[in-house]
Image (cartoon, grey):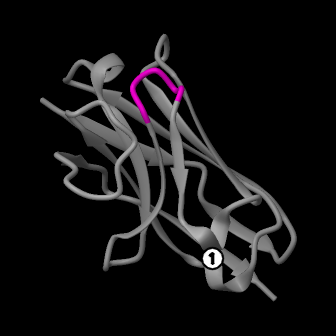
Amino acid sequence: QVQLVESGGGLVQAGGSLRLSCAASGFNFNTYGMGWFRRKEREFVAAISWSGGSTVYTDSVKGRFTISRDNAKNTVYLQMNNLKPEDTAIYYCAADRSGRAVVTEYDFWGQGTQVTVSS
């Protein structure tokens, strides 16, 4: 059974930091590209290839967010620094069987973790 479980969300003041984690199971994590999305509309945030060698970010988070992965732990991370109120959202992780860092066409999704940034 495929599972993606996000954690690490919470309430933080503007300018603060959070680190989101997504623990994967039930599929061969080491061959999948992974991504982070936010809001009900599944707005793209960041993606990383299976090896970690390629990353992609949406413009609004470049220089503030960093996506990384640990294939030994089947976990992908999103380090979020200098958070802004407009970053407030439910954040979802997703897995893509192509293995690439892509913006669309994801196969599996987690349930999400809430991030709230106060001004």
30 vs 67: above or below: above
Report helix, strand or loop for mark 1. helix
Q: Residues within 10 Å of mark 1 (few under 14, many from 20)?
A: some
Left or right of residue 47: residue 63: right
Q: Label 1 amino acid?
A: Asp
From the image, tell me which residue sits under label 1. Answer: 87
Q: How many marks?
A: 1
Residue depicted at x 64% and y 85% = 86
Residue depicted at x 42% and y 32% = 49
Q: What x and y, as percent, mark residue 105?
A: 19, 54
Residue 51 forms part of the magenta stretch: yes
Left or right of residue 45: residue 119: right
Residue depicted at x 50% and y 34% = 76
65 vs 59: above or below: above
Residue 48 forms part of the magenta stretch: no
Q: Nearer the viewer, residue 80 or 110?
A: 80
Left or right of residue 60: residue 113: left
Left or right of residue 106: residue 61: right
* Magenta segment boundaries in residue numbering: 49-53
116 vs 8: above or below: below
Q: What x and y, as percent, mark residue 75?
A: 47, 28
Q: What x and y, as percent, mark residue 82?
A: 83, 66
Q: Nearer the viewer, residue 105 or 114?
A: 105
